[in-house]
Amino acid sequence: MILYPNAKINLGLNVVEKRADGYHNIETVFYPIGLCDVLEVNPSETCTDYSFSSAGITIDGDPEDNLIVKAYHLLRSGYQFPPVDISLIKQIPFGAGLGGGSSDAAFMLKALNELFNLKVTTKRLEALAAKLGADCPVFIKNKPVFATGIGNVFTSIDLSLKGYYLLLIKPDIHVSTPLAYSLVTPQKPEVSLFELIKQPISQWKSNIKNDFEVSVFKAYPAIEKIKQQLYDMGAVYASMSGSGSSVYGIFSEMPEKNDLFAEHFVTAGQLQ
């Protein structure tokens, strides 16, 4: 079985308050995009537990620390199914605010459920995904949602960017998420993002913000420069995704290719 775990972007991100447990409550909109990894899962004829191999972007570390393998162990702790061979072609960059690892984990749960007809409900899959990461559950239904809490409480929204085009840039810069949170002063917005996202996209530039941008741009001016370049190219809306370091622009027409971002990871395509 082959699946294509996709990335997401954040449309706006407000850090609302710091919680007693040290985490932060936020509000954001998760929107799926077409940049995908390739995940293949098949019953194994040779191993007694699982095998894992990867290609594409290098994945360092012990496979046991990979969210895909953690998803396998989590589901196998409650359901019976045979050992599997897992293969991943990694194309979503790490540390980009795109949710690639979370998506891989969620799609692994869905793959095992379908492959072995486990009949795990969508609600249960979301609950399992939540044990793997705050934004993992969003990739179960894989639809645009307004997210609150630590990014794990979802409210359906009627939002479609079909007909628009995305240009996404990921510079070779690593932004520490804990550090990014530590530099933000939490504040409840005057108007909730849930309402602002209903405005025409032409108004988003003035009203929809990512709270991480102020501190991240100060520390990494190159990221801020990319955002301005996207606006200079004609983006209707541009923003950093999550805590960075990827930056995207949404365009009414596909922008012409140029050498501005030749040194960076670049992906482009039509939004759905």
Image (tube, rainbow, N blue to C red):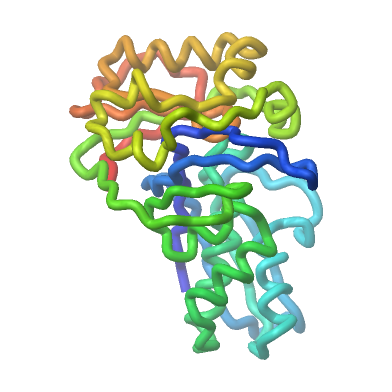
Residue sitting at 76 percent across and 59 percent down?
A: 63
| Quarter residue 73 falls in | bottom right
Identify which residue, 43 or 114, lies in the foreground: 114
Q: Position of residue 76 (x, y in %)?
A: 70, 81
One can see residue 169 in this view: no
Q: In this rendering, is residue 188 above or below 89?
A: above
Q: Position of residue 262 (x, y in %)?
A: 45, 18
Q: Position of residue 18 (x, y in %)?
A: 71, 37
| Quarter residue 162 falls in | top left
Residue sitting at 40 percent across and 49 percent down?
A: 32
One can see residue 34 in this view: yes
Identify which residue, 86 or 230, lies in the foreground: 230
Q: In this rendering, is residue 235 above or below 147?
A: above
Is residue 96 shown left or right of residue 160?
Answer: right
- Of all residues shown, which one is farthest toward the front? 190
Identify which residue, 33 or 125, lies in the foreground: 125
Q: In this rendering, is residue 62 above or below 269?
A: below
Residue sitting at 26 percent across and 46 percent down?
A: 160
Residue sitting at 74 percent across and 27 percent down?
A: 182
Number of marks in the rendered image: 0
Is residue 265 shown left or right of residue 58?
Answer: left
Q: Position of residue 126 (x, y in %)?
A: 55, 68
